Image: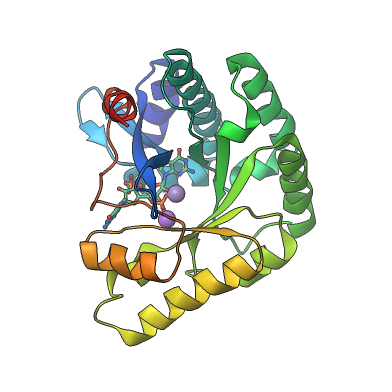
Amino acid sequence: LTLQHEMYRAIQRNEFILHYQPQYDLVTGSMVGVEALVRWKHPVKGMIPPGSFIPLAEESGMIVQIGDWVLEEACRQNKAWQDAGLPHIPVSVNLSIRQFVQNDLASKVASVLHKTGLEPKYLDLEITESMTMDVSHVSRCLLDLTEMGVGISVDDFGTGYSSFHYLKNFPIDRLKIDRSFVRDIQQDPSDAEIVAAIIAMAHNLNIQVIAEGVETEEQMEFLRKHNCDEMQGYFWSPPVTSENIEQMLAAS
Ligand code: G
Ligand code: G
Ligand code: MN
Ligand code: NA
């Protein structure tokens, strides 16, 4: 059986699970969101990280089915936390560009929100850059989603050549500074300048900023000093299980 064939079967067999990484407000320190990250609980190979199967899922088109499952599961879980009386925070879901190729992405999202009962403001969609997309189609989808009240974030900001083009053409609520810029903030003066400039520019455009891959207190202090809004990274928490998130929310 090829990995691709097994992946197809994995959807039916419910072998995918979501972990969640907390996102924190840099001023108050409180948990203000979580990012859903898929894993494959393979019956023989054990836990397979997304880096080992998402590219294949994208190539084969199976990312559409997996992405549908991720979206619904993340919304269902977030609504369950809310129903349990825990603080209401948005869940971020990573979208693959292939999920825009189906021309009903906005209605798919609307029906998942309806089915799970989650309010649109508690869902955030993360998009990444791609060379091969139809800008006007993606723009239309994102406008529909924004009008619905769903949040839109640009993931891995700064790594692709069209980052600025995204800000110009799409209704973006938040950008996520790629962890490659955050990593060397202390050592590399040009990374520090780039991060400071991204934050200032985003704020001038009324866009919120979250830093990814924050691993040290020094990085956090730098980001706070430069008015970054939120952060996500191992310094506070790696991706964890839904049970762990429930405990963290209960304690917050
Ligand atoms: O968790 P980890 O660092 O291994 O994630 C690696 C990559 O997989 C990240 O770039 C992340 O955006 C991507 N990824 C994780 N979950 C999903 C998902 O549900 N859908 C898509 N398209 N990508 C995901
Ligand atoms: O591309 P995306 O931003 O979706 O990737 C998210 C992934 O980044 C998560 O799956 C997680 O494993 C990884 N990640 C999260 N925080 C950190 C961090 O502080 N350092 C590093 N190196 N990776 C991180
Ligand atoms: Mn992401
Ligand atoms: Na990223």
Q: How is the image coloured?
A: rainbow
Looking at the image, the residue that sits furthest to the front is: 28
Q: Quadrant of residue 8?
A: top left
Residue drawn 57% across the image and 55% down it? 174
Residue drawn 59% across the image and 73% down it? 201
Left or right? Give the position of 116 relative to 3.
right
Tell how many labels: 0
Residue 2 visible somewhere in the drawing: no
Left or right? Give the position of 216 relative to 33.
left
Q: Quadrant of residue 248?
A: top left
Q: Quadrant of residue 9?
A: top left
Image x and y of residue 126, in percent: 54, 47
Q: Quadrant of the N terminus?
A: top left
Residue drawn 50% across the image and 39% down it? 93
- Along the viewing direction, whichever of 119 and 125 lies nearer the viewer: 119
In this rendering, the answer to whether 83 lies above or below 72 is above
Residue 156 visible somewhere in the drawing: yes
- Along the viewing direction, whichever of 1 and 220 lies nearer the viewer: 220
In this rendering, the answer to whether 109 lies above or below 29 is above
Q: Quadrant of the C terminus?
A: top left
Residue drawn 47% across the image and 69% down it? 159
Left or right? Give the position of 147 relative to 74.
right
- Along the viewing direction, whichever of 61 and 252 lies nearer the viewer: 252
Image x and y of residue 56, in percent: 43, 44
Image x and y of residue 19, in percent: 33, 33
- Along the viewing direction, whichever of 20 and 61 lies nearer the viewer: 20
Image x and y of residue 72, in percent: 54, 24
